[in-house]
Image (spheres, rainbow, N blue to C red):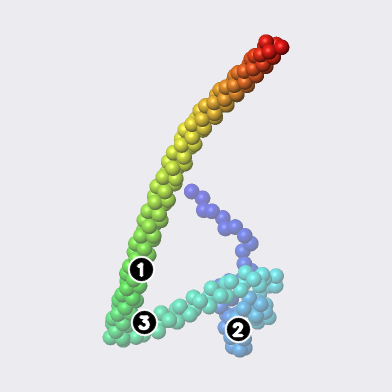
């Protein structure tokens, strides 16, 4: 299996040169950056130009962080064992305190969420009950409307029947009036005839 080739252009400097460039900049009282270290490397260490300051700055920051971590590691390694044990005990106490506080917060949040959920369930139950009550009232109103429609239909039937009866009675009255008029005229004619006959007999 062949080794994969590294991609990208190789840097024109070594890690040791960058570290030395950082030291030169710091001795001059400046903060190490890509530009300042590049200038120190080119002028003091005679490194060829054409260095990418942006890429160099990332390498500078990495080396500064590595140096600081190594410094802390040396300081910690120089501590007495009793101090290290005390630090571990303090760390455990802090961890226990933080975890305890977080546990209390979590418990309170769950309790609060439970209360809110219970309240929401009660509200939802009340809303459902109100909906059922409204639906029941709507059903009653629908039944009342249907009953009124039936009553209206019955009343119309009665009204039609009464109208027909009234029309029939009017026809009978009209017929009776016609018959009475006929009888009245016949009586008048008979009286007139009788009157004429009586006059002739007298003459």
In the rendered view, tell whether residue 100 sits above or below residue 184: below
Q: CA distance from mark 3 to mark 1?
A: 47 Å
For the question of whether residue 128 can be seen, the reply is no
Query: What crowding class fits label 2: few (fewer than 14 Cα within 10 Å), some (14-19), or many (20 or more)?
Result: few
92 on left or right of 132: left
Q: Quadrant of residue 181?
A: top right
Q: Position of residue 112 (x, y in %)?
A: 36, 68
Q: In terms of secondary structure, where does tag 3 sit? A: helix
Estimate the x, y position of residue 33 in percent, counting from the top left. Answer: 62, 78
Q: Which mark is residue 69?
A: none
Residue identifier under label 2: 31
Q: In this view of the protein, which residue sits in the foreground, 70 or 144?
A: 144
For residue 43, which quarter of the picture?
A: bottom right
Using the image, determine if residue 116 lies above or below residue 95: above
* Viewer-side residue, 87 vs 178: 178
Q: Which residue is denoted by mark 3 in the rendering?
A: 77
Mark 3 and mark 2 lie on one chain; the one further toward the N terminus is: 2
Residue 158 screen position, x and y as percent: 49, 31
How dense is the environment of label 3, judged by Cα within 10 Å: few (below 14), some, or many (20 and up)?
few
In the image, residue 47 lies at what x, y percent?
Answer: 66, 75
Q: Nearer the viewer, mark 3 or mark 2?
A: 2
Judge depth for marks 2 and 1 and give the one in front: 1
Separation of marks 2 and 1 at Cα, in angstroms: 52 Å
Pick whichever of labels 3 and 1 is earlier in the sequence: 3
Q: Residue at x 33, y 67 (%)?
A: 111
- The residue labelled by disc 1 is 112
Helix, strand or loop for disc 2: loop
Give the Cα separation between the discs numbered 3 and 2: 28 Å
Q: Residues within 10 Å of mark 1 (few under 14, many from 20)?
A: few
Of the residues under marks 2 and 1, which one precedes in the sequence?
A: 2
Quarter of the image with the C terminus in it:
top right
């Amino acid at each position: 299996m062949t080794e994969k080739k590294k991609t990208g252009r190789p840097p024109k400097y070594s890690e040791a040169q960058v570290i030395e460039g950082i030291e030169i900049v710091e001795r001059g009282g400046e903060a190490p950056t890509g530009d300042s270290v590049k200038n120190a490397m080119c002028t003091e260490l005679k490194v060829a130009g054409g260095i990418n300051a942006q890429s160099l700055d990332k390498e500078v920051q990495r080396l500064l962080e590595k140096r600081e971590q190594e410094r802390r590691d040396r300081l910690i390694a120089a501590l007495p064992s009793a101090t290290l044990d005390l630090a571990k005990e303090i760390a455990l106490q802090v961890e226990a305190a933080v975890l305890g506080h977080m546990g209390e917060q979590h418990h309170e949040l769950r309790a609060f969420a439970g209360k809110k959920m219970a309240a929401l369930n009660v509200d939802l139950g009340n809303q459902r009950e109100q909906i059922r009550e409204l639906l029941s009232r709507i059903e009653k109103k629908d039944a009342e409307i249907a009953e009124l429609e039936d009553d209206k239909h019955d009343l119309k039937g009665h009204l039609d029947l009464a109208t027909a009866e009234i029309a029939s009675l009017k026809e009978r009255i009209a017929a009776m009036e016609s018959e009475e008029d006929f009888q009245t005229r016949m009586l008048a004619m008979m009286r007139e005839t009788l009157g004429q006959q009586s006059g002739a007999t007298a003459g």
